[in-house]
Image (spheres, rainbow, N blue to C red):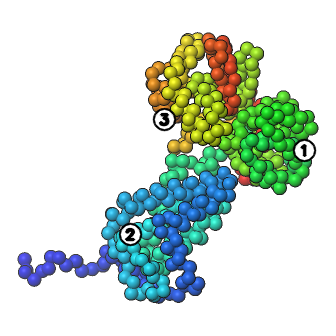
């Protein structure tokens, strides 16, 4: 071997792909530095600084949430969650895996440079990742808000090249990582669009172009005056009746006697009362969500006054199933869920505290008090055998879980009762948590699940509590639960409207 051979020198020939790409990246950076960006000097450096530590995006999320529409609030939460995941990935993997130096600032005019230069490695761009994650997360939940946020996110990403702190490839990689984080969040918590129920079976319902013929009864305790005003703006011919909760049954009956379409605004208990009246009078029902959870309206795909007004204007409606229960002389219906055991006790305890501390704190307090109390499991005869039960849940339609999101019904006319049982035994809190974690599983040591059109329970002690759509009543001896298939016509926007 000749001593003149340098073993450390690279082989002659074509440069590697990596060197080619890095050289191209540097030329693009220099090209951007030499260009004059009209109107950018007073804007982009300030915009870049405002995005430090996500301040710009948190402020944007707060402004979106202040609009008080469910879709805007969900878009804001999804945007922040996507940003958090992108930042975690950048700081734990991205910056540590590729140790790339920042660009030299010689070619960048002084007026563009940031007053405080970042000291972390250059690849990938954290600002671009946060901007893309927030904008993509928002757009996945609300395309309208996404269109508004996208130009700002794009400008923040471009400002990193403009101010000389990143190469173009750093920005592209960061943006790709951010968008990927938003889609990862969607996999864990699906958007409303992914959970939209099928538009079947369609029903014939009158179209009310200006709302004439709609009588909407609203629960003044629900705090939904802004939603009612929005519906009035959309449908000026509609009649609105405002009343406190104790007057709802009477006002619903009066409204049904003169309405072409019976409308209701309130929580799930109010919707239950309206559905029962609409069934008796053979009227289609229009539901404007106005409560805390609004399970029925959201499972229908009605989120706000715009959704409902559009469906009423076009005469778009579907037929949905209704659940019915009976126990002795006591009868009732449910459009969401029915349950016995721990949950009715929790509802009653929550109602005792809600007016003092608010709905959510009251729910937490009630859960702690009920699960810590020295109670025995409910004794009931199920399937011909006596069983100790901590909870029996009956859903009007099958509940599905996607990712970490709570269960949702994708079909409100499937003809099935979704029955879930949490077995009796020691440690009710652990059993209930295990049943919740099991979710889609049909059987586990803690719980079992079955889909049936009818259910019969016997052997219930006098004074046994039964909850249906958030209301609580007492039953005894025997309870029969069954489906009324496609019994109720409800307005909802149809796909493609």
Q: Earlier in the sequence, mark 2 or mark 1?
A: 2
Q: Secondary structure at mark 2?
A: loop
The residue indicated by pointer 2 is 123
Q: Earlier in the sequence, mark 1 or mark 3?
A: 1
Q: Is residue 396 above or below residue 59?
A: above
Quadrant of the image occupied by residue 482: top right
The residue indicated by pointer 1 is 213
Q: Earlier in the sequence, mark 2 or mark 3?
A: 2
Circles 2 and 1 in contact, beta carbons < 8 Å: no
Q: Position of residue 402 (x, y in %)?
A: 54, 42
What residue is drawn where x is 79% and y is 30%? 276
Q: Is residue 29 left or right of residue 254?
A: left
The residue indicated by pointer 3 is 437
Quadrant of the image occupied by residue 117: bottom left
Say which of 356 and 125 sits in front: 356
Cα gap from disc 2 to disc 1, whole angstroms: 62 Å
Say which of 16 and 13 sits in front: 16
Q: Is residue 344 visible?
A: yes
Q: Position of residue 267 (x, y in %)?
A: 71, 39
Q: Position of residue 149 (x, y in %)?
A: 60, 66
Q: Is residue 28 visible?
A: no
């Amino acid at each position: 071997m000749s001593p003149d051979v340098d073993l450390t020198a690279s082989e002659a020939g074509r440069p590697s792909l990596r060197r080619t790409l890095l050289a191209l990246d540097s030329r693009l950076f220099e090209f951007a530095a030499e260009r004059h960006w009209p109107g950018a000097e007073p804007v982009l450096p300030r915009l870049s600084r405002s995005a430090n530590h996500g301040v710009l995006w948190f402020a944007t999320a707060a402004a979106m949430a202040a609009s008080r529409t469910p879709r805007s609030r969900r878009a804001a939460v999804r945007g922040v969650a996507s940003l958090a995941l992108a930042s975690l990935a950048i700081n734990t993997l991205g910056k540590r895996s590729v140790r790339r130096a920042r660009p030299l600032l010689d070619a960048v005019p002084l007026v563009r440079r940031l007053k405080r230069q970042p000291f972390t490695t250059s690849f990938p761009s954290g600002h671009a990742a946060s901007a893309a994650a927030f904008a993509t997360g928002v757009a996945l939940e609300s395309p309208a808000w996404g269109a508004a946020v996208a130009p700002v996110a794009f400008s923040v990403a471009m400002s990193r090249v403009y101010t000389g702190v990143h190469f173009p490839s750093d920005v592209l990689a960061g943006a790709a990582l951010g968008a990927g984080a938003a889609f990862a969040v969607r996999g864990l918590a699906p958007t409303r669009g992914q959970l939209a129920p099928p538009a079947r079976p369609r029903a014939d319902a009158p179209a009310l172009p200006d709302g004439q013929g709609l009588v909407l009864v609203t629960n003044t305790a629900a705090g939904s005056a802004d939603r009612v005003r929005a519906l009035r703006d959309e449908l000026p011919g509609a009649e609105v009746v405002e009343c406190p909760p104790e007057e709802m049954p009477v006002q619903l009956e009066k409204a049904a006697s003169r309405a072409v379409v019976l409308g209701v605004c309130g929580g799930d208990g109010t919707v239950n009362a309206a559905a029962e009246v609409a069934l008796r009078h053979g009227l289609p029902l229009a539901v404007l969500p106005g409560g805390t959870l609004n399970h029925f309206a959201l499972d229908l795909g009605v989120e706000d006054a715009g959704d409902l007004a559009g469906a009423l204007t076009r005469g778009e409606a579907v037929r949905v199933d209704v659940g019915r229960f009976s126990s002795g002389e006591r009868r009732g219906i449910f459009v969401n869920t029915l349950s016995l055991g721990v949950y009715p006790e929790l509802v009653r305890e929550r109602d005792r505290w809600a007016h003092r501390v608010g709905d959510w704190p009251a729910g937490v307090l009630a859960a702690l008090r009920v699960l810590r109390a020295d109670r025995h499991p409910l004794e009931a005869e199920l399937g011909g055998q006596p069983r100790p039960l901590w909870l029996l849940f009956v859903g009007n339609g099958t509940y599905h879980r996607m990712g970490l999101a709570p269960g949702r019904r994708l079909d409100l006319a499937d003809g099935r009762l979704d029955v879930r049982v949490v077995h009796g035994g020691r440690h009710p809190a652990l059993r209930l948590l295990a049943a919740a974690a099991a979710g889609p599983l049909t059987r586990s040591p803690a719980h079992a699940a079955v889909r049936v059109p009818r259910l019969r329970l016997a052997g219930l002690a006098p004074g046994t509590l039964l909850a249906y759509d958030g209301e609580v009543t007492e039953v005894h001896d025997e309870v029969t639960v069954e489906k009324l298939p496609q019994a109720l016509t409800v307005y909802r926007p149809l796909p493609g409207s």
